[in-house]
Image (cartoon, rainbow, N blue to C red):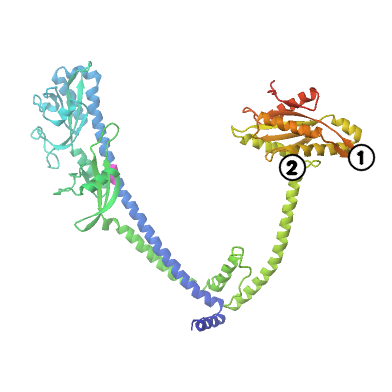
Amino acid sequence: MLKALRDRLRRLQDRMSVAQQLSIVTAVVSLTGIAALSLSSAGLSRQEMIRRITSDMRDTAGTLARQLDTDMFERFTDVRQLAGMAAIAPLWEGDPAGVRALLDQLQTNLPNYSWIGFARPDGTVAAATRGMLEGASVAARPWFAAGLKGAFVGDVHEAMLLAKLLETAPSGEPMRFVDVAFPVYSADRRLLGVLGAHLSFEWAERLRQGALGSHGDTDIWLLSQDGAILLGPDLAAPPFPPARVAEMRRASSGAFEDTRDGTAILTGFAVADGEGDYPGLGWIVVARQDSSVAFAIPTRVGATIIAIGTGVLLVSLILSVLVARLITRPLDALTEAAGEIGRDPRVTMLPRLRGNLEVIQLSGALRALMRRLGSAETRVVQTAQQYQEDLAALRKLADSDPLTGLMNRRSFRSVADTALRGTRSSDKLGILMADIDHFKVVNDTYGHAAGDAVIRHVGACIGDALRVQDRVARFGGEEFVVLLLDISERDMLALAERIRTAIRSTSVAFEDRQIRVTVSFGAALARPDDRDVDAVIERADHALYEAKAAGRDRVVLSTGFDRAA
């Protein structure tokens, strides 16, 4: 049944034109592609805007937290500097009126201070702004007890002794303060008392209101380090459980979504953890926004993108008829089959394709082309192989001495320099310079052909005696150089002696004559201060000169000669 259905569809395709087939395919592809693009774009845009809104909540909380820390650091610094100023140290032991005038001036310049006072070591207030609490004892107050020992910053608390002396806060709420205290010492480091200041917490409320003004749809709270609300709505219990508060303190800043009264709330937070040497009070700034409000814009953007995508889809369906000739399923199948050639070794020919007259003709033409390309490929492979062989032969000629087949001077220097640079500290590299004794006599007596035979014989004797890792090169004329890797001085000299003895004990057969020759050797080991292999060759060459001068047919080890010597 399926086979009959497939045959019927194929006959229908054969009767349809390319344009008709492509119109159907283009319509389906356009519908799928534009729908997927619209949906994915809408989703991505919504996610990006949600990320930005979340980041804005976190940044809003962070900005207010930094403002609180900065202001507290400045007030902390003000009190510390006043308590430690050497220039006014005598004033603390003098007339209280002078201290009061100084404190009144500081309060005038910094109105956030509700009260500033100086208490003697017994807790008696000696001088204070506007004379408030002068003569009273503050010995039981935490700021005084802690201030006797060192710097102190106290968390928010309601007024106690000052409640009846200060004006009611503008908000109508009870007066609340943040305490700052420092010990005061004389020039000879005697404790004179404690300088304490009460910073009105209305300052923090003004900062919060300023932040609220620039974020009309956002609620901003200030929590204590244990999660209680310091500024914000009057709730019967802390707004977040202890585990959430602990997580906020560990993270320092971030954002999350929670639920209150059935409403999802997007919450950003930041911990005010101090600035400079001001330790911070661990306040937590929270910025909150209803999720339905926060996500309304991303939702609208996503809906707009989907609407635009739908419109583009309708236009694409209309245009698909005009561009239908650019897309066809049979042609895709032909392209896919062609793409497998060269990847799958089993595919060597394009299939015969059906679908319409144009595709049948095209597949036949491409099959014929593939057969012609197969013949051309064979010729190309043969030519490339011959080229590689010729290139290898040319490289060998360039790196070899034509008479002996050994390495020439250029290739030897490249190998030797590489070996010297790669030698480990535990390895030793040696150089042997060899020269045929009285070689000119051989040439003059037997001719240059005999001299060439002698050179080949000496080169072969040296090569046969070497190890696998060693290299020998003809440097020119009757001179040879040997590179010895990982060798000691004793082994290098022993190897040179074996080569010298082998050459001396054999003769070179040339025509009907036997020619005997000897060879002199100069030997040198590489030193850590050698900049390149030429320095080692130069010492070996000098040792060779000494061997020649000492009577030839011998091995001489370099004793450290260098160019400076």
Q: Is residue 164 visible?
A: yes
For the stretch drawn in magenta, the main secondary structure is helix
**Disc 2 or 1, which lies upstream in sequence?**
2
Front residue of 364/296: it is 364
Q: Is residue 220 visible?
A: no
Eyeballing the image, is 264 above or below 176?
Answer: below
Eyeballing the image, is 405 above or below 111?
Answer: below
Front residue of 498/99: it is 498
Quarter-of-image position of residue 327: bottom right
Looking at the rendered structure, which numbered label has been put on residue 399?
Answer: 2
Report helix, strand or loop for mark 2: helix
- In this picture, residue 532 sits left or right of residue 355: right
On the image, numbered disc 1 is attached to which residue?
Answer: 512
- Dot 2 amino acid type: Asp
Residue 45 in the image, given as x and y percentages of width and height: 38, 58
Eyeballing the image, is 190 above or below 391?
Answer: above
- Would you say residue 61 sits in the magenta stretch? yes
Residue span colored magenta: 60-64
